[in-house]
Image: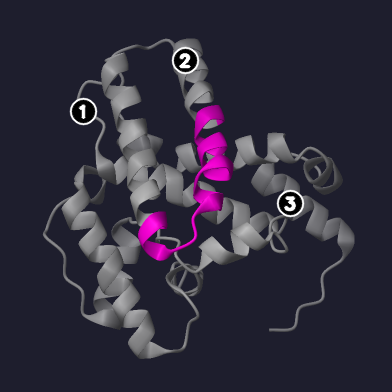
Amino acid sequence: MNMEISPEALEFLWFLLFGMRYEYAKNNIEKTLLKCARLAYRDFCRTLKYKTDSIAERKEFVGEICASLVSKITDELFKCSSEEEFDKKHKEICEWVITEFNEKDILREPFCYGQAQKWLNMTLKNMIVTGFWDKDENFKRIKNWMHVPVDSNIITKAKIDFQITPENKTWSRWEYDLYIDFQNRIRDGIKKNKKYKNPIDWEFDKWYK
């Protein structure tokens, strides 16, 4: 796809998505990482029912989770050397997020795996969108093992492309077994299809269509 777009327009699009100028984001990578996590939170926060009406309390707690989440990504996920290890570490991180929320007792209903996966997977997807990690060997390696962020839209696309029909349950309430079965079936479909290098490339192509 060939597109001609002015630098000014690109700068506008970047600011519209990430809320910061491109050069600033590039030179402040830790803040960009945090922004990736915060944007990921916004993607699923409508599924959360808080007990507290205090926006300040929520913001502080979510900020703490975001900071720890991105550290776990760079310190743990980046070091994975196999798909099996990646899946194991991915599960550990999701379970950590679940524990943090449920022990905080800040929600009216339990925080579930479906919500945790969306946070972690969308953070990784946002990192891809920035392009800042394209040449990072660790990131390039784990990209092939990344999971697709599960939501109702991508469930529909998986049914169309790979005839995957998971249990009729809202994605945000999914538990681990249902989730990992869905991811593995997408991986199998990608291997047979051979059009896409990995599941996350398929997700990028299909989500908006």
Other-residue count near label 2 (Cα within 10 Å), few / some / many at <14 / 14–19 / ≥20: few
Q: CA–CA distance between discs 2 and 3?
A: 27 Å
Residue at the limit of the structure toward the front, as seen here: 81
Q: CA–CA distance between discs 3 and 1?
A: 35 Å
User: What amino acid does circle 3 point to?
Assistant: Trp
Which numbered disc, 3 or 1, marks the residue closer to the eye? 1
Q: Residue at x 32, y 24 (%)?
A: 101
User: What amino acid does circle 1 point to?
Assistant: Pro
Q: Which residues are magenta?
A: 67-86
Image coordinates for residue 167, horizontal then vertical, percent: 11, 60
Q: Earlier in the sequence, mark 2 or mark 1?
A: 2
Left or right of 132, for residue 206: left
- Vertical arrangement, residue 33 with respect to residue 142, above or below: above
- Vertical arrangement, residue 95 with respect to residue 180, above or below: above
Color scheme of the displayed model? one colour
Residue that carries the numbered disc 2 in the rendered image: 55
Left or right of 184, for residue 63: right
Left or right of 203, for residue 165: left
